[in-house]
Image: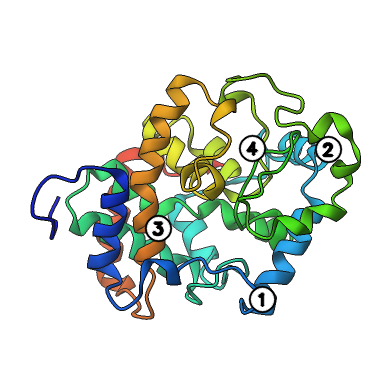
Amino acid sequence: MSTVSAGPLESLDQWDDDVRARYRPDRKKEEFRVYDDKTPQVVRDFYKLNHENQTLEFVLAKKAEYTPLNHGEMSIWDAMERLDKLVDDSDPDTDLSQIEHNLQTAEAMRADGHPRWMILTGFIHDLGKVLTLYGEPQWAVVGDTFPVGCRWSDKIVYPEYFENNPDSANPELMSPYGVYDEQIGLDNIHMSWGHDEYLYHVTKPYLPEAALYMIRYHSWYSAHRELDYQYLMSDHDLEMMNEVRKFNPYDLYSKSAAKPDRAALEPYYRELIAEFFPPTLKW
């Protein structure tokens, strides 16, 4: 991997700073993911709906509805093109379409010489947002994710919006562990419903474990960036979250106003998709 560092990266924080410096030198690290009263109203409205409605009951119902993957079949590229008109209401850092953001992420990884499976993961990581095509509102598709069924971390963006979530009235769900046990493991945790969890189930048969962790948890900022919820993770989960942290700077800092050349890049990504996936997948 090419780098501007004088020597080997000594920590994941240094990795994060290094990627940001190369891909968004015009913006300081603290200028990304700013969620306060100056954040665009559409973002604040999004998180209010998200935090009020993502209950344990809601998540269990959506997992039962979607994880059987009985909503049809389509190719990875078809799913990508269907996202062309979607702009993520939860993201204050870009107004590009999803395919443009995905290409930015993947191309940054490709430029740094990462393995083909990771470049592919960067390209497809937001494909679960096809949930919007099934009529799901954005608050049930995008945004930061978090466990349900236990107390919400105060490190989640706009934690005050949880006060109107019905689960807040259930004492069993408001303890640190809630319905879970210490170090129960992430496979046994119910995350807020959205594109991360959905795409994990779609791609699970085809990708290496590190890629699946990147897909499933890349929006869980209170865990991979703020280091909360570690008491629910197994030792293996703690190790694999380092892979998510390697992925995250490319997802975040590759965002820019410059649009990738889709026509020129399409042959490379079609070949990459065919290397890992069948012509169509169940969704």
Q: Quadrant of residue 100?
A: bottom left
- Mark 3 lies on a secondary structure that is helix
Q: Are marks 3 and 2 in contact (CB under 8 Å)?
A: no
User: Which-is-in-front pick, marks 3 and 4?
Assistant: 3
Q: Identify residue type, mark 4.
A: Leu
Q: Which residue corresponds to the image point at 12% horizontal and 55% vertical from the top-left?
A: 2
How crowded pointer 4 is (Cα within 10 Å; few <14, some 14-19, many 20+) is rated as some
**Percent position of residue 67, x then y:** 66, 35
Whole-number angstrom distance, CA of label 3 to CA of label 4: 26 Å
Whole-number angstrom distance, CA of label 2 to CA of label 1: 30 Å
The residue nearer to you, when weighing 105 against 280, is 105
Whole-number angstrom distance, CA of label 1 to CA of label 3: 24 Å
Label disc, if present, on residue 251 of the rendered structure: 3
Q: Identify residue type, mark 3.
A: Asp
Quarter placement of the C terminus = top right
For disc 2, the marked residue is 57
